[in-house]
Image (spheres, coloured by chain):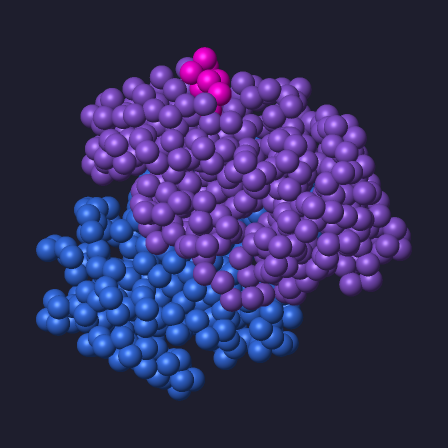
Chain colours: A purple, B blue
Amino acid sequence: MLNFEYNIPTRVYFGRGEVASLEQELKTKYKKVLIVTGSGSVKSNGIFDQVLAQVKKAGLGYNELSGIQPNPRLKSVYEGIQICRDNNIDLILGVGGGSVIDASKAIATGAEYDGDCWDFFINKASPERALDIGCVLTLAATGTEMNGNSVITREDTKRKLALCTPHIRPQFSILDPEYTFTVNRYHTAAGVVDIMAHIFEQYFSLTESCDIQDGIAEALLKVCIRYGPIVLESPRDYGVRSNIMWAGTLALNGLIGNGKEADWASHGIEHELSAIYDISHGAGLSIIIPNWMKHVLNDKTVSKIASYGVNVWSIDTKKDLMDIADEAINKTRDFFTSLGMPRSLKEVGIPKDMFKEMARNAINHYGKVGSFKKLNTQDIVDILNSAL
Amino acid sequence: MLNFEYNIPTRVYFGRGEVASLEQELKTKYKKVLIVTGSGSVKSNGIFDQVLAQVKKAGLGYNELSGIQPNPRLKSVYEGIQICRDNNIDLILGVGGGSVIDASKAIATGAEYDGDCWDFFINKASPERALDIGCVLTLAATGTEMNGNSVITREDTKRKLALCTPHIRPQFSILDPEYTFTVNRYHTAAGVVDIMAHIFEQYFSLTESCDIQDGIAEALLKVCIRYGPIVLESPRDYGVRSNIMWAGTLALNGLIGNGKEADWASHGIEHELSAIYDISHGAGLSIIIPNWMKHVLNDKTVSKIASYGVNVWSIDTKKDLMDIADEAINKTRDFFTSLGMPRSLKEVGIPKDMFKEMARNAINHYGKVGSFKKLNTQDIVDILNSAL
């Protein structure tokens, strides 16, 4: 286990009707809030009205920025920053899924920076502060509600990049599983894949003696595997939605990654795909993850992948380690498929034309891609080819 | 899953040499610290000197309160409060195990209260504030380093009672597994039992759909069962000590209890034992827990206890549920015994004389004892009799 700092100051209010906790969070600390939303579903399903009622009850003024797209765009972030500057905003309240909240975070730090906030994403500058951020989550997927990450897409240069800094950890997050009841089948499934992908990125590591982190990771994976198919059939089952929602948060709040070297290669590769082809992040991961697993499987990594097979998929321990690992990878791919997620790039209409450019972009941006197995440009091209 | 608020603001610095993080934590926020220690082991093993070097580096003045006993006494708390008042202390820094840190917490809240701080423990008053608290942990056991609990013993009335309030959550905790290398065999084993007991108290619950909490609880239990015997043989194994230390913290920081109704009957009963007979808390729990499990096993609880048997002890699922549960309880008792912990009250010299009084005290203080199965006075007497 490596040294780590565990510091998760976000206050989470979890459960039915917890939107009522908003008033208390808002009324003593803030004066003017920017409410950020997505494509309009929170308006049609009544969540926006519930949030607005709390904002008014707390006596706050507000502005609104709606229309944040999946793979949130930099231009929306700029728009939000301008609203903050023009209106003395002191809290950004994201009401939506990962895209809305990631955009809220980028706005929060951009509003407190004199330069171009894209600087933070291309490692040209580091944020020193941000406006406070609150979340009302409506999709279980990215874990952004309890971490310091934001992923933004810049359309003109086709780059999708991440900012990781404690300054953008939300002060509070409202997690009401009922708010995810109306998420459609496709996005629910993509969310489950995203959650599992976050766990894999931290679980598959060569750091030793991390039984706690790995045991928790396996428990979260088993919840996704148990409840993934059920939630698609029973989208209004509170217990099922609760477990998936809380799994999504714990999958990426530091709990399973602290003390370990994480990998993040699959995310690096997927970000290149969705930056250029604007596919759903979960769909991209569903294609990349099993192919990445196959590519990195070797004598050094086999025991970890086999442990995953035994502890998560209950594969017979008497088999050969390499066979267990292979079976675990196949089970992972088949599970994603069973949720209706794609297996190949062909299925989502992505050709091989830009594989080399994507691989080079990933290597250039991250410097190092992968740690479970370090990948070079050719490795990434090979993974993409195997995913065709 | 029940609604819950997840709010764990303690900053944890985990790993080798993390005492060096103290300077930064101390120097900007505090002026005068009260360092609280126990029987002197931190002075003989050099930990106190390392802490003191940080306090001096940060430019803080300090006072000292040493000699906190296991089952920390109210009179030491009063002594600490007096030192705070006489010296304008603004931070209590506990350097030791659970007793030292629990005493530090009681001092922190008593120093900010005009009345008698015992009021908080007998539910006569609620704390409204406390001095800041920092921890340097030297024993993996109670989880006090990341929660709002403190247990104090009042000698004259032979009561051992708990205070639970967010005001006494430490601002920061230093967890260096190397600081536990010199803990002796007996206290290491008692610590493992204490950690497992905390998990049981929250795991054994009738609240449904808590797969996340329960999966994490099972992962932590498996770490204790895997590493408990190993740490007794290899007390200076960093990986082993790391896993046990982090298990102890996560076992009682809210992670596995949030969203569930917890039981806490075994702790209620054990506190009566150690209040009167001053036995080690872990030893008392080692005796009580398996007898409590046997007593509460019935048609309503059997499936949960059997799940524990299957998921933690890998008992064959083909057996009858009641047999699985019985086997799980026996395995738990045998495991505690294998660590050198007692099985019976006789072994620690406790007679049956005061069973009725202890049972009445527990019921009177807590109002309700147990929730997995609600216990009355006779239930508690029966559990104590079966533990003789």
| Residue A44 among those drawn in magenta | yes
**Residue at (64, 76) in percent of width and height:** B233
> Can see residue B269?
no
Q: Position of residue B367 (x, y in %)?
A: 33, 40
Nearer the observer, A299 or B91? A299
Please tell me whether residue B272 belongs to the stretch shown in magenta: no
Q: Is residue A252 visible?
A: yes
Nearest the viewer among B125 and B276 is: B125
Total numbered labels:
0
Residue B274 percent coordinates (x, y): 39, 62
Image height check: is A61 above or below B302? above
Q: Return the residue nearer the eye: B31 or B344.
A: B31
Q: Position of residue B335 (x, y in %)?
A: 64, 61
Image-quadrant location for residue B352:
bottom left
Percent across and percent down for residue A175 are 44, 32
Q: Nearer the viewer, residue B102 or B112?
A: B112
Residue shown at 62% from the left, 55% from the top: A364
Residue B338 is drawn in which quadrant?
A: bottom right
Q: Residue at x 66, y 19 (%)?
A: A233
Q: Which residues are magenta?
A: A38-45
Determine whether A174 is above or below A129 in the image: above
Answer with left or right where residue A173 lies relative to residue A383. left
Residue at x 65%, y 54% (from the top left corner)? A363
Residue B301 placement, left or right of B7: right
Asked whether, in this view, residue A330 is left or right of residue B56, the answer is right
